[in-house]
Amino acid sequence: MTPRVSVAVALTVVLLAGCTATPTPSPTPSPTLTAPPPASSTTTAATPTSPLELLPADGRRLAIADPRGVSVVAGEDEGWEVLWERADDVAGPAFPHGDLVVYQRASGEVAVDGPSGRDVVGASGELQDVASTPQGPALVLLDGTTVVFRHDGADDRALLRLDAEPLAVSYGGGRLAVLVLDEEGTKLVLRDVTGQPLPDPRLGIVAAAALSPDGRRLAAVLAPRDESHLVVVDEFDGLVVRWDGLPALDELDFDGRTIVATSIEGTLVVADLDAGSLELRLHALDPEAHLRWDRADRPFLDAAALSMPEGRSFVRLVAVRPTDDGWELVADPAEWLTGDAAERAATAEGTDAPGGFFIRDPEGSIRLAKLADDVAVELLALVEGNPTPTSATPEDLASLVDAPDPDRWFPTGYFWVEVANGEVVAVAQHYVP
């Protein structure tokens, strides 16, 4: 191994012996618990005798990365141990994924590494997160203002484009937590993978955020001028817990139960959501270190193995993308209702159906399907300003979904899709008044 400051040594310092060589800074205000569940919180200003108590040793894996390399550690009843480490030029965090770890090299390539060796793949954008598919890890990348999902080597799906400048992305359960920059500073927006906005948690200025594996809970660092607040918000229950009086935290990961957060000075904060407890440790890590939990069981879009059903379906098209063997569409199933059914559905959702129709977009997974080589595509072209059914190509369909030409196509994203033998044989744009 190339000589370096070993991550295993750093881990030993962090988890076994403490960091005694670093001068102790001025005391940090004690964190206080200000929301349920009621439980005590503690501040550990000095190195404890057994730093392993800061992390629950229950068989889970954790990756620690800094610019010099990556270590993967595992917790068991007896404590934590280094499974393996790799020297490399690393940019950002490393994401453990079962026996593997995925990280971005300083050269921009993404490495999928493990005890038996390392594979390196090209990537467009900055690695933000890693999710699971039946085929292996799926990359969540940020390429300018576009969030890109890539899995199985070269399958590239750009499902979300943002108007504001995105700074960071966290994925969980088919949802995205995106930190964006606006005039007032950084704020958080939640989207599903089809790009649709989710309810705004209204947290104010957010310095860091991470979703639980199922996407239901969000951990976030609120960042006023002189201190941080750590909160967990549930999709249904609202605020679950809040800790105040913390140092300026700028990064965290959340496995649904435990939060690991770090500050620019290397402060390590570990919060246990089950117990409502929090421990803070000063200068426990290299300030450039990143920690990430293994969350290999989280679903990728809920869609990696879900195909379009046979027959005719009403959908909102999310994307139409070229692949190595043709075209693929990504669809969000919907329902076109008319008459009494439309009135009942609209009333159930607290609105009405003045035009005699209602589009219901039920919660559920997006669907994937390959276009047949001889697929029949019918789009609504504007002929003297009137939407007119017109034969078109998959390229026209992709252009309409991605960036419709208002002078050429009628702007509606809803379609009827017919599937036979696992392939889309016909796509027809639906007129919505």
Image (cartoon, rainbow, N blue to C red):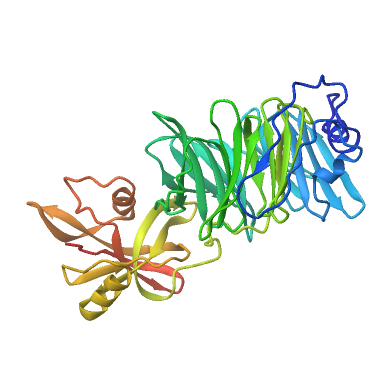
Q: Is residue 156 left or right of residue 345?
A: right
**Front residue (pair 283, 110):** 283
Measured as percent of width and height from the top left, residue 111 is found at 68, 39
Q: Is residue 62 left or right of residue 425?
A: right
Q: Is residue 384 left or right of residue 37?
A: left
Task: Give the residue at x 36% y 65%.
Answer: 361
The image shows residue 84, relative to residue 194, as above or below, that is above
The image shows residue 197, relative to residue 25, as above or below, that is below
Measured as percent of width and height from the top left, residue 297 is found at 67, 59
**Front residue (pair 333, 113):** 333
Furthest residue in direction bottom, as rendered: 340
> Which quarter of the image is occupied by the C terminus?
bottom left
Is residue 291 in sight in this rendering?
yes
Q: Is residue 43 left or right of residue 369?
A: right
The image shows residue 169, relative to residue 255, as above or below, that is above
Furthest residue in direction top, as rendered: 23
Q: How many marks?
A: 0
Measured as percent of width and height from the top left, residue 222 is found at 55, 37
**Front residue (pair 374, 271):** 271
Is residue 372 in sight in this rendering?
no
Quarter of the image for residue 69 reads top right
Measured as percent of width and height from the top left, residue 196 is found at 39, 53
Task: Give the residue at x 14% y 53%.
Answer: 382
